[in-house]
């Protein structure tokens, strides 16, 4: 008999411990059906949430060996193969407050979701009589975001949230904000973006954990990027984040290559860069990563233009015009 | 080994991480991989340009791919973010954007058909261990090395997809082939913070300090990364991270190709080992 063991992180409100449960391997099992079998046959005190068992309700997300999965949508065999072991650690989602065993507290997360101002404020031409129609192409721009089932997987291993959740939101919040910001029927797309700008929109680390973990193949990092671009196009160009990103675009069109020496003053402003980055600059020069001559050339002259720069400019401008 | 690639160095290999270019070219030359630099390659956007101008980012990378395809070669890069940007662009083109982006490329007499693929030096080295391991002249048996994969080396797996993104082993296989001992640290698959070092500086510093500190606490002589941007963050900003967090001690950081170069017996000067912020002297004394 092949035996599978789940080491489950338990919590009873005051005490934490890990409890092991072993059971016979069954290729038909999902992670959720294993948890249900444990609760029914071995330990009725084990707490977890689950409802639809069809990857629709989003309530059964847990971590397997530290990585979030939707338990009902994850075949046991797939995780056994992935980890090359018949023993798995089952934990509650990361970056959530644990209430009991694998049950996490969604109340504060829903409050944070409210900051995205979810809900469509329709454009004036729409009426109750004519409706709020949009073309298939317009719907396609927000279709993926509508798939979000609020399971929390995207937030569990987000590196920024793990470090500090005071100045960043759960990735699904940005996805929901972008869902309304990109909706062709919206009277005020920037309403949602503005709220996110003040809540960490430019602080995403690009760690790609959210994109990797979403069981619905939504890309919250792309939603963050799309809202940044929308904000920039609407004139919100100040701040370290937008200035930093814009510097790359400027260099792309100026010479085709990044000018590393101008990047910091462009991002932080000349005075802040000169005062705050002095020791950094000194160590770059001392290590030979940068020579004084090279730095002077880059700052006052720029990189030499790449071969075919005119072609690159034509391609970019053609795409933009489209 | 006899392989040839269209080489995409990326901006940092021509700038602050020039030593990574030196090491990449030295190792490639030693193991029989010919790197032909793509003429007129442009910045990939570095996971930044798309935030202000997504069409410019896509167009620039479509052009990079078209230039490589014109050479009749697959692309090889030594930067994980460059690899992610190029592979993302390729995936976008292959999934319905080919025709309209080719309209733009036509304005510069270019076309991308989708034949040129994009690979990473890590993947090449991992796939060819059996070819270059016999060339190891200086087994690094006294070195303990903590791998730091870098987010964009493995994530998102639908774009990168070389190996199991949750439990990769390519770095450890290469470390072992070099004769060194792999050390697993909790930060192995974490973010270094580089892409948000300006808007989220404190977070970036804490992540950097954690990786450096955990490597040292676990007995590693150095961190090893296949991404020059992770290297810049972990090495160049390590003094700032140390100062901000109070986590003491210095941890040298090597580029993947520097470690392989050391094992292959390539001279230290050719690997740019003196061009680091955190000194590699103590580490080199063990080689």
Image: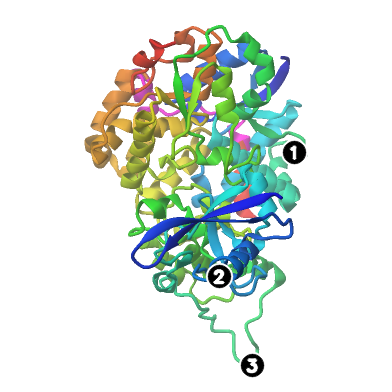
Q: Is residue A226 visible?
A: no
Spatial CA distance of label 2 from label 3 is 37 Å
Residue range corresponding to the magenta coloring? A289-311
Residue B205 x %, y %: 33, 41
Q: Circle 3 — which element?
A: loop
- Circle number at residue A129: 3
Q: Is residue B92 above or below residue B257?
A: below
- Count residues near mark 2 (Cα–Cα under 10 Å), then give few for <14, some for 14-19, many for 20+: many
In the image, what residue occupies the spot 40% across and 25% down? B220
| Residue placed under numbered mark 2 in the picture | A59
Spatial CA distance of label 1 from label 2 is 47 Å
A191, A26: nearer the viewer? A26
Task: Name the image quarter holding residue B114.
Answer: top right
| Residue placed under numbered mark 1 in the picture | B111
In this rendering, would B146 be left or right of A184?
left
A257, B276: nearer the viewer? B276
In this rendering, would B169 be left or right of A246?
right
B186, B223: nearer the viewer? B186
Sequence-earlier tag: 2 or 3: 2
Task: Name the image quarter holding residue B41.
Answer: top right
């Amino acid at each position: 008999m092949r035996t599978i063991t789940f080491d489950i992180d338990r919590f009873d409100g005051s005490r934490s411990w890990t409890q092991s449960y072993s059971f016979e391997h069954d290729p038909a099992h999902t992670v959720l059906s294993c948890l249900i079998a444990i609760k029914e046959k071995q330990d009725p005190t084990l707490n977890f949430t689950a409802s639809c068992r069809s990857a629709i309700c989003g309530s059964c997300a847990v971590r397997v060996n530290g990585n979030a999965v939707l338990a009902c949508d994850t075949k046991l065999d797939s995780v056994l193969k992935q980890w090359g072991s018949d023993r798995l650690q089952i934990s509650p989602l990361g970056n959530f407050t644990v209430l009991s065993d694998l049950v996490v507290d969604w109340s504060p997360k829903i409050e944070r979701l409210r900051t995205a101002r979810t809900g469509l404020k329709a454009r004036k031409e729409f009426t109750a009589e004519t409706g709020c129609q949009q073309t298939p192409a317009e719907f396609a721009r927000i279709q993926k975001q509508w798939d979000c089932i609020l399971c929390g997987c995207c937030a569990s291993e987000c590196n920024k949230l793990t470090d500090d959740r005071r100045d960043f939101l759960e990735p699904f919040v940005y996805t929901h904000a972008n869902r309304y910001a990109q909706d062709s029927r919206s009277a005020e797309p920037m309403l949602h973006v503005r709220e996110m700008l003040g809540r960490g929109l430019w602080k995403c680390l690009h760690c790609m954990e959210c994109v990797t973990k979403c069981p619905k193949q939504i890309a919250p990092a792309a939603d963050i990027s799309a809202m940044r671009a929308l904000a920039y196009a609407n004139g919100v160009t100040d701040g370290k984040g937008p200035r930093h990103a814009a510097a790359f675009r400027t260099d792309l069109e100026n010479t085709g290559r990044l000018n590393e020496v101008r990047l910091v003053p462009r991002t932080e402003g000349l005075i802040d860069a000169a005062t705050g980055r002095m020791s950094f600059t000194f160590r770059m020069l001392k290590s030979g990563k940068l020579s004084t001559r090279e730095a002077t050339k880059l700052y006052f002259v720029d990189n030499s233009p790449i071969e075919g720069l005119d072609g690159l400019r034509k391609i970019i401008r053609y795409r933009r015009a489209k | 080994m006899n392989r040839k690639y269209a080489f995409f160095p990326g901006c940092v290999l021509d700038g602050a991480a020039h030593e990574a270019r030196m090491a990449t070219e030295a190792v490639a030359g030693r193991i029989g991989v010919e790197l032909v630099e793509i003429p007129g390659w442009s910045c990939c956007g570095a996971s930044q340009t798309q935030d202000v101008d997504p069409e410019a980012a896509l167009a620039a990378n479509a052009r990079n791919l078209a230039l490589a395809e014109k050479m009749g070669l697959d692309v090889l890069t030594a930067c994980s973010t460059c690899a992610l940007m190029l592979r993302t662009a390729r995936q976008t083109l292959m999934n319905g954007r080919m025709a309209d982006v080719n309209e733009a490329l036509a304005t510069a007499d270019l076309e991308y058909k989708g034949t040129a693929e994009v690979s990473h030096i890590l993947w090449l080295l991992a796939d060819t261990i059996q070819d270059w391991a016999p060339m190891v002249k200086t087994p690094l048996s006294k070195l303990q090395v903590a791998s730091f994969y870098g987010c964009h080396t493995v994530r998102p797996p639908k774009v990168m997809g070389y190996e199991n993104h949750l439990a990769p082993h390519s770095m450890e296989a290469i470390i072992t082939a070099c004769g060194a001992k792999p050390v697993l640290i909790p930060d192995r698959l974490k973010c270094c913070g580089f892409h948000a070092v300006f808007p989220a500086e404190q977070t970036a510093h804490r992540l950097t300090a954690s990786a450096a500190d955990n490597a040292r606490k676990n007995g590693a002589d150095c961190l090893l990364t296949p991404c020059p941007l992770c290297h810049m963050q972990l090495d160049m900003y390590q003094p700032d991270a140390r100062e901000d967090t109070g986590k003491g001690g210095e941890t040298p950081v090597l580029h993947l190709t520097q470690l392989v170069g050391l094992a292959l017996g390539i001279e230290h000067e050719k690997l740019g080992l003196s061009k680091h912020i955190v000194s590699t002297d103590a580490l080199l004394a063990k080689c």
